[in-house]
Amino acid sequence: MSSDNNGRQDEIFISPQMVTRLLGWIVFGLVAIHIALQAFHYFVSELPWLLRELFDVDEEESFSTWFSAIILLTASLLLFLIARSSSFNQEKFSKHWYGLAIGFVVLSIDEVVGLHETFNTITDVAWTVPFTYLAVIIFAIYWKFLVSLPSVAKKSFLIAGGIFLSGGLLVEHLADYYVDIYEMDNFGYQLLTGFEETLEMVGVILFIKALLRYILSEKIECFRFVVKAK
């Protein structure tokens, strides 16, 4: 952090690498606690539901859900900052940046409100099926946008998105099949949900890192936030 001659602090230096490392350790801790508590509950002694719920990555009222909502909202904020700069410079794909920003706001809300769970209550079709088609459509719409990005950003965005969707769509779809056969009240299901949420959170964190690096490479001024390389 720096200050001007009057002592007013007006810059916060952010390192993409340090942010990624910090968030990554938080994910590791949350998932490790989830697995440890579930293992103790199923193989040693039953634990109170409220204690398990606080650290259950599959529950809405948990530390993991709160953390996921925060990092999704953080990604949205970075996208809005990039979109604002893109719009100010009258760049071609500014609307695409705004679209991504709004999309991540919706994902953050969904983490807490549970919009996709509500979808499952009004139809017999698992939400992962129509949303897979939706993801394909969005990818097609954003193809030219992706192609226009610098190669490093493009590769990073695709990797982060692939990891996130692998957890949010593929693993969760497999979990639905698992529940049909073995139900939910077992350690195997808890491992699956832990794996699913890990992929989703890691995907978002890698996306945040990619956005910070993009801001750095493009020298985008984000109000009074300054991203530095190390």
Image (cartoon, rainbow, N blue to C red):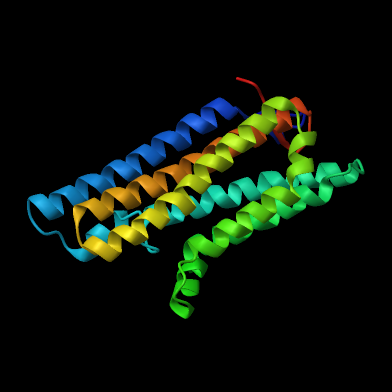
Position of residue 78 measured from the top left corner of the image (x, y, whole percent): 68, 44
Specify the farthest residue to the left.
44
* Above or below, comparing residue 119 to residue 76 in the picture: below
Whether residue 227 is visible: no
Image quarter for residue 199? top left
Specify the farthest residue to the top.
230
Left or right: residue 124 compared with residue 227: left
Please tell me which residue is depicted at 27% across the width and 48% down the height of the picture. Answer: 191
Left or right: residue 187 compared with residue 198: left
Image quarter for residue 56? bottom left
Please tell me which residue is depicted at 60% across the width and 19% down the height of the picture. Answer: 230
Position of residue 206 measured from the top left corner of the image (x, y, whole percent): 55, 35
* Above or below, comparing residue 136 to residue 50 in the picture: above
Q: State which quarter of the image contains the N terminus.
A: top right
User: How many numbered dots are placed on residues in this image?
Assistant: 0
Position of residue 180 measured from the top left corner of the image (x, y, whole percent): 29, 65
Q: Residue 75 or 176: which is nearer the viewer?
A: 176
Left or right: residue 144 compared with residue 75: right
Q: Residue 117 or 61: which is nearer the viewer?
A: 117
* Above or below, comparing residue 37 to residue 223 in the picture: below
Left or right: residue 57 compared with residue 167: left
Please tell me which residue is depicted at 76% across the width and 33% down the height of the picture. Answer: 149
Whether residue 214 is visible: yes
Position of residue 99 measured from the top left corner of the image (x, y, whole percent): 74, 54
Specify the farthest residue to the right.
90
Please tell me which residue is depicted at 27% across the width and 55% down the height of the picture. Answer: 189
Q: Residue 128 or 210: which is nearer the viewer?
A: 128
